[in-house]
Image (cartoon, grey):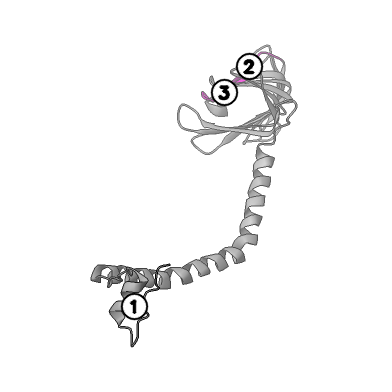
């Protein structure tokens, strides 16, 4: 049987303890660049944390107002562009544009249905045309067809035309060229205005109502005003 190693007597030195414990990890002193990076990170943290807290508090405080505005925008969008999912018909349709002279026109309808690649069927359509001088002409009917690419609006059933001087015309169908600012009808037309009362076999309107020519045979009753 082997003999046990002799026990050490007396105090143990630091070198002997380190040697008995094995190799130790040597800790390196931080360099100047590492210290500088730490300072930058600490300074950034001091600024970013209060800013982030302020943004968080602001978003919490403003969230009810943001939600209200967002909901109002959704309601307005649905009112302006409400579409029936089954039929694809658009409610409260509105089309805006300018004619060849840059004058604006607007076409609205209670509902609109895309019927083919270029045809749009309108229910209760109205057309509003403005001249360069600021005068206006409005047409409306129960039904209409709008060819947007050609700027052609065909109206039918109870067609009424208003001019801002008080002239009103009634007929059963009319074709309106919104780009040229012209309209025409070959059906019986009843007109009333400052001039009196007129019944004719159709009319032609040019320059957005600046001139109206009635087709004969026609019957005119002049106004009694001087």
- Picture quadrant where residue 194 is located: top right
Q: Residue at x 61, y 57 (%)?
A: 66
Q: Would you place residue 149 above or below residue 61 in this image?
A: above
Identify the residue position indicated by label 3 in the image. 148
Secondary structure, mark 3, is: loop
Q: Which residue is drawn at 35% across and 85% down?
A: 9
Which stretch appears magenta?
175-187
Q: Nearer the viewer, mark 1 or mark 2?
A: 1
On residue 97, the disc is none
Q: Tell me the distance, in whole angstroms, between the alpha carbons under discs 1 and 2.
A: 96 Å
Identify the residue position indicated by label 1 in the image. 17
Q: Nearer the viewer, mark 3 or mark 2?
A: 2
Q: Tell me the distance, in whole angstroms, between the alpha carbons under discs 3 and 2.
A: 12 Å
Q: Are marks 1 and 2 in contact (CB under 8 Å)?
A: no
Q: Residue at x 73, y 30 (%)?
A: 85
Residue at far front of view: 1
Residue at far left of view: 32
On residue 116, the disc is 2
First of labels 1, 3 by sequence position: 1
Q: Does the magenta stretch include residue 36?
A: no
Q: Nearer the viewer, mark 1 or mark 3?
A: 1
Q: How crowded is mark 2: few (under 14 residues within 10 Å), some or many (20 or more)?
A: few
- Is residue 40 found left or right of 66 in the rendered image? left
Secondary structure, mark 1, is: helix
First of labels 3, 2 by sequence position: 2
Camera-side residue of 74 and 3:
3
Q: Position of residue 161 (x, y in %)?
A: 67, 28
Q: Residue at x 31, y 67 (%)?
A: 37
Q: Do the residues labelled 1 and 3 touch (CB within 8 Å)?
A: no
């Amino acid at each position: 049987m082997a003999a046990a190693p002799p026990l050490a007597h007396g105090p143990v030195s630091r070198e002997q303890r380190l040697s008995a414990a094995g190799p130790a990890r040597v800790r390196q002193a931080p360099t100047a660049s590492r210290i500088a990076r730490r300072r930058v990170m600490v300074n950034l943290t001091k600024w970013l944390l209060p800013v982030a807290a302020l943004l968080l508090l602001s978003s919490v405080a403003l969230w009810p107002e943001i939600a209200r505005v967002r909901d109002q925008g959704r309601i307005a969008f649905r009112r302006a562009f409400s579409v029936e999912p089954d039929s694809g018909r658009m409610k409260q349709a509105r089309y805006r544009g300018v004619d060849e002279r840059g004058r604006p026109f607007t076409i609205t309808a209670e509902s609109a249905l895309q019927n083919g690649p270029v045809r749009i069927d309108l229910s209760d359509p109205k057309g509003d045309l403005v001249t360069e001088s600021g005068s206006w002409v409005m047409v409306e009917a129960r039904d209409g067809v709008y060819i947007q690419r050609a700027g052609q609006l065909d109206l039918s059933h109870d067609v009424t035309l208003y001019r801002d001087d008080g002239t009103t015309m009634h007929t059963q169908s009319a074709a309106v060229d919104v780009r040229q600012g012209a309209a025409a009808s070959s059906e019986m037309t009843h007109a009333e205005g400052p001039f009196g009362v007129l019944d004719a076999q159709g009319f032609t309107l040019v320059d957005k109502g600046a001139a109206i020519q009635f087709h004969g045979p026609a019957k005119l009753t002049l106004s009694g005003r001087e």
